[in-house]
Image (cartoon, coloured by chain):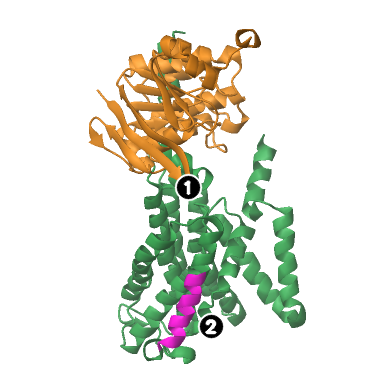
Chain colours: A green, B orange
Amino acid sequence: MDATRQDAGMTETLVRREPLLGGAEIAAILVFVATFAIPLLTKSVLVYSVLNQILVGVIAAQSVWIMLRMNLLSFATPAFMAIGGYTVAIAGRFDITDAVLMTAAAFLLPALVAVPLGALVLRLRGTYFVLVTFVLSQIMQLVLFETPSLTGGSNGIAGVPPVTLFGSELASYRQMLLFACLLALLATLITALLTRHFRQHFAAIEENEVLAESLGLVVWRYKALGFVVAAGVAGLAGYSLVNMLLTAHPSSFDSITAVDFIAYTIVGGRVSILGPIVGSTLLIWATNLFGTHGQYAQGLYGVLILVVVLAARGGIVGSVAALSRRWRS
Amino acid sequence: MSELRVEGLAKSFGGLRVFENISFALPAGEILGVIGPNGAGKTTLINVISGRLAPSEGRVLLDGRDVTGWPTHALSKLGVARSFQQTNTFRSVSVRENLARAIRFGHGTEGDLARLLRDFGLGDRLEEQSDKLPYGLQKMLGLLMAFATGPRVVLLDEPAAGLERAERHRIDAFVQHACVAAGCAVLIVEHDMDLIRRLCPRVLVLDAGAVLADGATAEVLARPDVIAAYLGVTDDEAA
């Protein structure tokens, strides 16, 4: 075979077109489409409560996961959740409850705030980035407590009106849960489209930022894009949380809750969008289960995280994927 | 055609002056060797020209345009590519994906990469994970990734370091291809004097952060001060 034909065959596919969504992204979206069936199949208050917590946790964990795709461990999620949640609660005071409008606001406001913040914090890497994003969450707590005329201060904002869709109030527990499912589906779609479309760019930054930049990748642009979208997704988590509680309170957005969202992501596995979904579901379900043994709850939760992290270094999804590859080969 | 010009370049880290007053011009299609003892500032020079570090003084011009202090990605877009002293690839992905990223990020083209891949023994290893390749092939992959960005100026930082003698002809082939076929200006930092003699008509010698000599390779390498500072003399010669 002549070399020219061999060369043509070899390089025709060096740069392959990426599909819009991969298998993991489609599976994640299908999970949340299927979730809509749960409120329709049961009226169990316990199931509703746990599912609502899981949905909030999944959205918040997806925000963490977007940044982890670029090897940036962000503790700023509760701060952006607070912006999204309080936006909805403050708008409720003025009887602005339209679901579409509020969803857009809960996404866009944190995203806008993230633009200047990103310009400051994305210069940092590693431990410094972790510390500064943690400080952002602490500052947000201070802002919430020190601006009572806007945020209600330490009392928060109670009695947030339920959202309305096309003029109808989504006031029943089932309707509120269905709306939470919708927010989770939306957050998953945004996360999937972003991380899939820029999969190679994010992966290159995660693995070797210096090399990526020397090849022409404008690293700061992708980090900023990720940070802004992650902030918007966190804002949706805040909206979902306030919609569940009908209250916006500083304690709901405590900076230490970032540790939970990070744990969901690490335990589930950072290799795939399914990781934060599996991790959130397992750990929130376990929290509720262990809650029946109050005095041991925290210990059992810690033991579970230790077991998963030690036994499955790539998280649950990463380990299952590795086992599957080994099985196939 | 591109020309890289460096004027009065200096770099310091705090009170430590790495090099100073370095000037040279490197027209398209030419090869310049940069040699000098360890610590002379050769790699730092590449880091400054490629935008990884900002210079303390002086200017870097590309086709007469002042690009001093431009970030790496911007210089890459203008056609400045570099390789690294150590193997530097995306270790967790295949050879194909490494090259695809280089083409995608650098807006390069596949061009004649296929022939280079075959010549360098990578043509039938496209699906192998890059960190599973032998050291020499990882270094060649790094060079090909730099070339895949479609450069006009190529900065090579010790491309032959760690390669077996039998593998070094690949560096020659790569440099000749970049210089002759692609018309790139090529700067090579290297300790392998045979390679420098083979490839570089002109050489710049750095010593203690200053230019000791700049000129035709054979003449420069025969200069007593260059021999004393870098090449050294045998015991017999010393006697």
Question: In the displayed structure, would residue A213 be above or below residue B138?
Answer: below
Residue B36 image position (x, y, % from top left): 50, 25
The residue that appears at 56% across and 27% down in the rendered structure is B138
Instruction: Give the residue pinned by disc 1.
Output: B15
- The stretch of residues the image draws in magenta is A135-147
Q: Chain of mark 1?
A: B
Q: Name, please, the residue furthest toward the front.
A: B239
Q: Using the rendered view, name the quadrant where residue B34 is placed.
A: top left
* Mark 2 nearby-residue class (10 Å; few <14, some 14–19, many ≥20): some
Label 1: which secondary element: loop
Residue A108 image position (x, y, % from top left): 34, 68
The residue that appears at 50% across and 22% down in the rendered structure is B190
Q: Nearer the viewer, residue A30 or B40?
A: B40
The amino acid type found where label 1 is placed reads: Gly
Checking the image for residue A251, the label placed there is 2
Q: Judge left or right: residue B135 versus residue A116.
A: right
